[in-house]
Amino acid sequence: MDRTSRVVSAEELERQRAFAARVRDHYALRGRMPLAWTQTFGCQQNEADTELIRGMLAEMGFGFCEDVDEADIVLINTCAIREHAEDRVYGNVGELSHAKKKNPALITVLCGCMAQQKHVAERIRSSYPYVDIVFGTHALPRFPQLLFECISRKKRVFDLEGDERGYILEGVEPVRQKGRRAWLSIMYGCNNFCSYCVVPYVRGRERSRTPEAILAEFKSLVAQGYKDITLLGQNVNSYGSDLGGACDFPTLLEMIDEVPGEFWVRFMTSHPKDASTRLFDVMARSERICSSIHLPVQAGSDRVLHEMNRRYTAEKHLSLVDYARSVMPDITMTSDIIVGFPGETDEDFQKTIDLLERVRFDSLFTFIFSPRRGTKAWDMPDPMSRENKQRNFDRLLAVQNRISREKNDEYVGRRVRVLVGEEENEKSYNNEYTKQSRTEGFKLVYLRGAEGLEGRFVDAIIERSSTWALFGAVADGESR
Ligand code: 5AD
Ligand code: SF4
């Protein structure tokens, strides 16, 4: 390990490559390409991690399959953010027992945020004997070694080890999803310890990739034809705070905006306590940074925000929103809201509704509080009944759905730039608006007249709207 940065050392990379070669040899003896099946739960960061793991699997000689029954290795990358996410993982892991019965040589792997927690690993060890490999987020760079140990010694392997400062893995080429959209991790981990959140415990401390590494990967994505690239980090606005002043997030955006090519760049997630007016100024000035931001506010009551350890007030959030709109009047904004944080009263909740009415986000990700073991909120008194929380949650959805609908209605008749995707929509109006596309603000637009324009930026005239999507026609003069 390099002392000044958290980047996995060249020696360690070599060591893992040697294990990768031995895994490749092991499967090569069988005379056909081994296949891997992967499944990802949770956030985009997890998607990006799975793409890295798929990169390692490709290096080990694996191809990929869509059908579990064809797989030689099954890997589930897990999420720990809410109980519901964990329950779904346990359900899917349970089903692996059937796959294993059908094919006893199958290697089953559980990794990621859930697997980083000791109590989860213990439960897997005792109750799910058909899971062969369990490794946490910190052990990700050691995956080739873990796989080799499992297949050569024919025994279960558990690896939850690792410094909680975490690591950065460079030099592995991710195997990305097909299409025009790509994730690019610019940093890992989180230092914020919001009192409800398990992320800092399972992903370790904040560490930033160097601007050089990010730019090199970005350019390669553009060269490969990716056109909608999302920069990822748990809190992108503190990017670079561990790089000794070499670069901060707005500066990174400026550098990326100078890369030649036709693309859009977006980023997530922004913490309101660290988002600066300079960030919005750079976004407003830039050519290819989308006027779009995900700015999780979580709650509208200052008392609840304080208990959540968010370190901003509703007023500070509103002033950011106002500033962003003053320099980018068309900016789209989305947010996360937690309903029913311990001790939140109906009066507190009303402040969340008031904030939503004031800000008018384009859309929201809404969650009912889920206690996470090891976090501060786990032990907080939580007197509000589940029914009361559900009632508030339903009310929140109704308010937001109305706002989303009203905001989408404003688009009807407008000309907007969209990136045409590959996917078709089966439930379009009269089968007319079939092609899926996205605006700069990441609004979903179903298009008519877009055949043959996949992967292109075109202008569209919006003709209809709904709560969830816009419907439009490719504008005259857009050539095939
Ligand atoms: N319960 C409910 N929602 C949570 N989130 C994070 N932790 C919890 C939890 N324990 C939500 C927050 C965060 C989003 C990714 O998930 O809103 O912004
Ligand atoms: Fe969790 Fe807060 Fe970090 Fe986001 S900023 S990952 S909510 S601790």
Image (tube, rainbow, N blue to C red):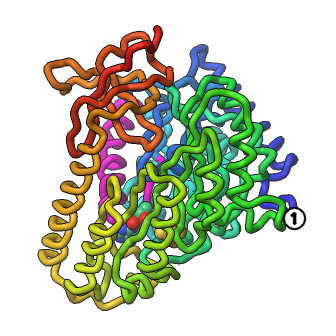
Tell me the residue at 38%/63% (across/down). 336
Q: Nearer the viewer, residue 104 or 134?
A: 134
Q: Is residue 468 above or below residue 192?
A: above
Q: Main secondary structure of the magenta part?
A: helix
Asked if residue 74 lies left or right of residue 138, the reply is left
Tell me the residue at 28%/35% (across/down). 470
Q: Is residue 263 above or below residue 383?
A: above
Residue 250, horizontal then vertical, whole percent: 68, 57
From the image, tell me which residue sits under label 1: 3
**Taking the image as drawn, is residue 365 in sight?**
yes
Asked if residue 86 lies left or right of residue 309, the reply is left
Tell me the residue at 54%/62% (across/down). 270
Residue 325, horizontal then vertical, whole percent: 47, 59
Residue 163, horizontal then vertical, whole percent: 70, 68
Q: Quadrant of the N terminus?
A: bottom right
* Amino acid tagged 1: Arg
Number of dots carrying numbers: 1
Q: Nearer the viewer, residue 192 or 265?
A: 265
**Taking the image as drawn, is residue 80 in sight?**
no
Magenta span contains residue 88: yes
Q: What residue span does the magenta drawing correspond to?
A: 77-103
